[in-house]
Amino acid sequence: MRRRVTAADDGRVNEIISGLFLSPLEILALLAALALVVARWLPPAARPRTTVVAGAVLVLSGLVLLVTGIRWQLLPVLAGALLALPFALAPLLRRRSGRTTWRARWWLALPGSLACAGLVAAGPVSAWAFPVPEFPEPTGGFAVGTRVLQWTDQQRPETFTPDPADRRTVVVQLWYPAGRSPAGAPRAQYLGRTEAEARTVAGALAGGVGLPDFLMDGVPRARSRSVFDAPVAGDGGRFPVVLFSPGSGGVRTQNTAWAEELASHGYLVAALDHPYDSAAVVLADGRTVTTETSSSGDADQDEKLAAGWTAVRAADLGFVLSQLEGLDRAGSGDPLTGRLDTGRAAVTGHSMGGAAALQAARQDHRFRAVVDLDGFPHGPASPSLDRPVLAMTQALTGATDARYLPRLTEALAANTATSYRLTVPGAAHLSFMDGPLYLPPVPGIVGSLGRARSPRVVAGATLAFLDAALRDRPGDLSGALSAYGSLTVRAPGGR
């Protein structure tokens, strides 16, 4: 079975066994705790040795885990072991003292043993429900590099702050085709440049949906499949550019698996943090900017607010494309100079980011294609779109906002280029991001596609569309997209 290594910046190493969602040390502690629980039920000759060995293993593995960083999932395991320990030690103490004491009958001891066993079992169950995410290996021909940039738009005031001198700043993470890194090169931290940043972001994401921080403890430990600042691939020509805007309260890294898959197939992906909208954005000077957006509870007012936030995001996307054009120009001194094909650019997004992508394409004709990942359109419906659009949605149910499908249908019907609406069976709203990799596999939360399949489906459909829209690759696009779900095609003029 493969193992994935996650390492913090200070050199600590925790190995998580794929499929078990536990490290070898955690498994040792789990087995030792279980042995202490069952020791009372073993034959008298086996009890002393089992208790001594299990107790020693539990203490040693627990001490090492305390040093390397213990996960909350192991706390019920340790609690179960501590509750069972007095009953496991009692026979040893009686034998050593030579005293005969009363021993509980089996039908009295059984409920306590079952309770301890339940606590021990809660450890692996919670590790399965909230795992350290395992990122899928990209399938393309390129290794993947990543880097983080921060840009300030001197032409735009920051509308979320009262300071008239404050300019709009965005943080952007790039994933790009890279050359092969040396063996053993550490993979990029998920959710941030460092584990400290990742923990800040994870805590903000948890708080944004009302979860306690500790439930997201495993996510900052994860490593993606890319390498920070890896050398740009020496071949592959110039890379088409794909910009990405996350969902409301989302962050630039929320679609890392999707971005790495696209980059491995020769695309440069630029994902944005939108300060004061994203859950938490750590700036270059160390400041952390948290979200200032919140709903009012009034549907009409919320629609106006969402339209305004979408407009800010759309402007951010256009600004970042201009910055990428600057990176590509001769004389910029950047490793990506001459490698970015910004004339073949797509704009994409999830949820509110999908709405921003639609608005950005209306306003900026440099974007040649749009991918909306389950995004409710906000803002003006004019001018009409005039470039190919792929809108991926979950299956609509009675719980879906009744305005969603009419609003999306209106936007696609007015498009003067061909639009594709792909309904992905088994998908939920969070299936279109990394959520299935680390959230409980509850269909109502992350859909029923499964942890491994969810990112493959979303990235596969995206690649099929972008290859046709940006690379003019021949083939049956409708047939390729239909492999991922139910497809509706709207040709210009309603044909």
Image: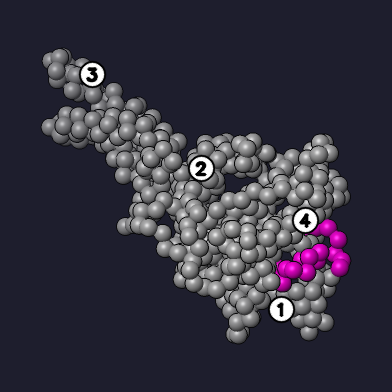
Spatial CA distance of label 3 from label 2 is 56 Å
Q: Is residue 356 left or right of residue 435?
A: right
Q: Is residue 249 left or right of residue 38?
A: right
Location of mark 1 (residue)? 489
Spatial CA distance of label 2 from label 4 is 28 Å
In depth, the one of 477 and 142 nearer the eye is: 142
Location of residue 82 in the rendering, given as x and y in whole percent from the top left corner: 34, 27
Q: Is residue 396 left or right of residue 493?
A: left
Few, some or many C-alpha atoms within 10 Å of disc 2 (few <14, some 14-19, many ≥20)? some
* Residue contact between numbered discs 1 and 2, judged by CB atoms under 8 Å: no
Per the image, label 4 sits on a secondary structure element best described as helix
Q: Which mark is residue 315?
A: 4
Is-magenta flag for residue 61? no
> Label 4 sits on what residue type?
Ala
Q: Residue at x 55, y 45 (%)?
A: 192
Spatial CA distance of label 3 from label 1 is 78 Å
Q: Residue at x 44, y 52 (%)?
A: 187
Q: Which mark is residue 102?
A: 3
* Residue 25 makes an appearance in the image: yes
Is-magenta flag for residue 382? yes
Residues rendered magenta in the picture? 361-383
Spatial CA distance of label 4 from label 3 is 77 Å
Location of mark 2 (residue)? 194
**First in residue order: circle 1 vs circle 2:** 2
